[in-house]
Image: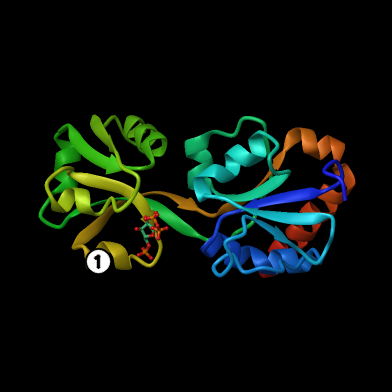
Amino acid sequence: MNVETMITLALSKGRIFEETLPLLKAAGIEVLDDPEKSRKLILDTNLPGVRVLVVRATDVPTYVQYGGADLGITGKDTLLEHGSQGLYQPLDLQIAKCRISVAARADFDYASAVKQGSRLKVATKYVAIARDFFASKGVHVDLIKLYGSMELAPLVGMADAIVDLVSTGNTLKANNLIEVEQIMEISSRLVVNQAALKLKREPLRRIIDAFAQATAAQT
Ligand code: PRP
C-alpha cells in the first residue's frame, strides 16, 4: 500500500480513543493494537489501507493541518486553542462530552469580584478560550499559562480562579473548588486535511459518511 492511497487517522489515547472505536467499527475499521498496552505509535487496522497514529491530544490538529494525518478527532477545546487553519470540520461526533468552566475557591466571592470590576488572576492551559471569554464579559484578567493540574493554582494562592474542563466535577470537589461559571459545552470533532479531501475523496467520504450515520444513530 503506498502512502498516496493510505488513509491515516490521528487519535489521542484515553477517552477520545475509546469513544472513537464504535464509530470506526461502523465504518468497518477495527484497530488491531491497544495503545494503552503497546508502545507503537502507528497502529494497524483490519484494513490494509487504513492506519491510526497515536499522538498527544493537543497535537491532533497539527498533524492534520500539515498532512501528517488525513483526518483526526479532537476536542472543541483543543481546536479553539489551536485555530482551524487548513482544517475541514464536517462533523460534531458528540463524543467525549464535557464543559469548560471557571472555578474558584469557596471562600473567593467570584460574582462580587466580577461585579466590582476587580482584576482577576486566572490560571489555565486554555488561554485563547479564557481571553475571549473574559474580554466578552469586559472582565480584566491576568492569565497564567499552565500545562496541567490547574486546580492547584487557587489552592496555593497563585490565582483567584482557573479555567478548565469539567466532566463529573469530581476533580473540583476533591480540591475544594467550586464551578462558578460555565463557558461552553465541549465535544469532539472530526477534522480533515483539506488537500487530502480532494486527493483521496472517495475513501475519506466513505469514512465521513459512516461516522455521520453512526453519530446520528447514537443521538
Ligand atoms: C481533565 C480536567 C480536569 C478533569 C475534570 O483532566 O483538566 O482535571 O479532567 O474531570 P472531572 O470533572 O470528571 O473530575 P484530564 O484527566 O483530561 O487530564 P489533564 O490534566 O491532562 O487535562
The image quadrant of residue 5 is top right
Q: Position of residue 51 (x, y in %)?
A: 74, 55
Question: Relative to 130, is 189 on the left or the right?
Answer: right
Q: Residue at x 66, y 40 (%)?
A: 64
What residue is at 23 percent from the left and 58 percent from the top?
A: 178
Label 1's element? Answer: helix
Classify mark 1 as within 8 Å of ligand 1 or not, answering yes or no. yes
Rendered location of residue 20, percent (x, y):
64, 63
Q: Residues within 10 Å of mark 1 (few under 14, many from 20)?
A: few
Q: Which quadrant, please, contains the C terminus?
A: bottom right
- Judging by the rendered image, the residue that carries numbered circle 1 is 173
Up-down: is 21 above or below 82?
Answer: below
Given residues 70 and 173, the one toward you in this image is: 70
Which of the 4 image quadrants contains residue 137? top left
Which residue lies at the image location 47% right of the left edge and 37% below the top edge? 81
Left or right: 107, with 170 as reference point:
left
Image-based side of 155 in relation to 205, left or right: left
Q: Where in the image, quadrant-wise, is ligand 1 located?
A: bottom left
Q: Is residue 153 above or below residue 13?
A: above
Residue at 38% in and 67% down: 168
Q: Nearer the viewer, residue 91 or 123?
A: 123
Instruction: Identify the image quadrant of residue 140.
Output: top left
Amino acid on which the number 1 mark rests in the picture: Lys
